[in-house]
Amino acid sequence: MLMLHPSKVGVQNKDYYPLVETLKKLNKLDNLKGWKPLKEYLNNKVIIDPIVATHKSDLELIRENLSIMSWTEKKEDGLEQYSKKNCKKAETIILDLINQLEKVAENDFDRKEELIKQGVLNLNKLNASLDGSFIETGEREELCDLFDNIADAVGLNVPDYQDGIASKWRDW
């Protein structure tokens, strides 16, 4: 079984045409059902701008590629906890964390870990305020990967944290 979430596939300049074409050839295009831009890609309505080389920090790239707001699609399936308001709260926690980490001295690893801890604890509070139903299995995995990526981006040694850095403080 092949399951894909296009916004999590690494592509340059939002060029999903090779992915769409490959899935068409494999007769697996139905794995993208529910992906809103699919019709536009199938009808060649998406115009890909030339790639502009930019030098962005890992934290900037993480910030630009957050997919928490895509969780709102689950509301269509009756999962009311994934409202725009709740997803925006979660996204704001992560954005605040990134903004704070960008201001920390490069070798202040204790402060970086403390900020990550506060981010995880803030997500614990948000999840608890929603009866523990906001961060389910898929979201947990996504957030754990996200926190590990953030930790790695700021120079923390993620393998030092058994089960990832978020596991040290998370309730979800």
Image (cartoon, helix red, strand yellow):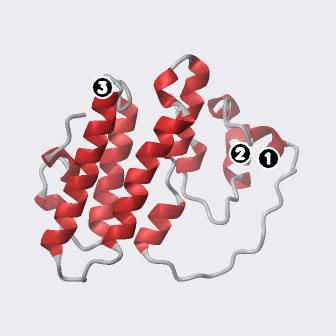
Q: Position of residue 41 (x, y in %)?
A: 79, 46
Local packing at callout 2 (Cα closer than 10 Å; few below 14, some 14-19, many 20+) is: some
- Residue found at x 81% / y 38%: 39
**Residue type for callout 1:** Tyr
Q: Are marks 3 and 2 in contact (CB under 8 Å)?
A: no
The answer for how far apart the CA atoms under marks 3 and 1 are is 37 Å
In terms of secondary structure, where does tag 3 sit?
Answer: loop
Q: Position of residue 101 (x, y in %)?
A: 31, 70
| Label 1 or label 2, whichever comes before in sequence order | 2
Local packing at callout 1 (Cα closer than 10 Å; few below 14, some 14-19, many 20+) is: some
Q: Position of residue 136 (x, y in %)?
A: 35, 28
Local packing at callout 3 (Cα closer than 10 Å; few below 14, some 14-19, many 20+) is: some
Q: Is residue 85 left or right of residue 121?
A: right
Q: Are marks 1 and 2 in contact (CB under 8 Å)?
A: yes
Which residue bears the numbered disc 1?
A: 41
- Quadrant of res 127: top left
- Quadrant of res 12: bottom right
**Residue type for callout 2:** Val
Q: Is residue 94 left or right of residue 74?
A: left
Which residue bears the numbered disc 2?
A: 20
Using the rendered image of the protein, determine whether residue 138 is visible from the camera's viewpoint: yes
Q: Nearer the viewer, mark 3 or mark 2?
A: 3
Which residue bears the numbered disc 3?
A: 132
**Residue type for callout 3:** Gly
| Label 3 or label 2, whichever comes before in sequence order | 2
Q: Residue furthest top?
A: 78
Q: With respect to residue 67, does 60 lie above or below?
A: below
Q: With respect to residue 23, does 19 lie above or below?
A: below
- Residue found at x 44% / y 44%: 89
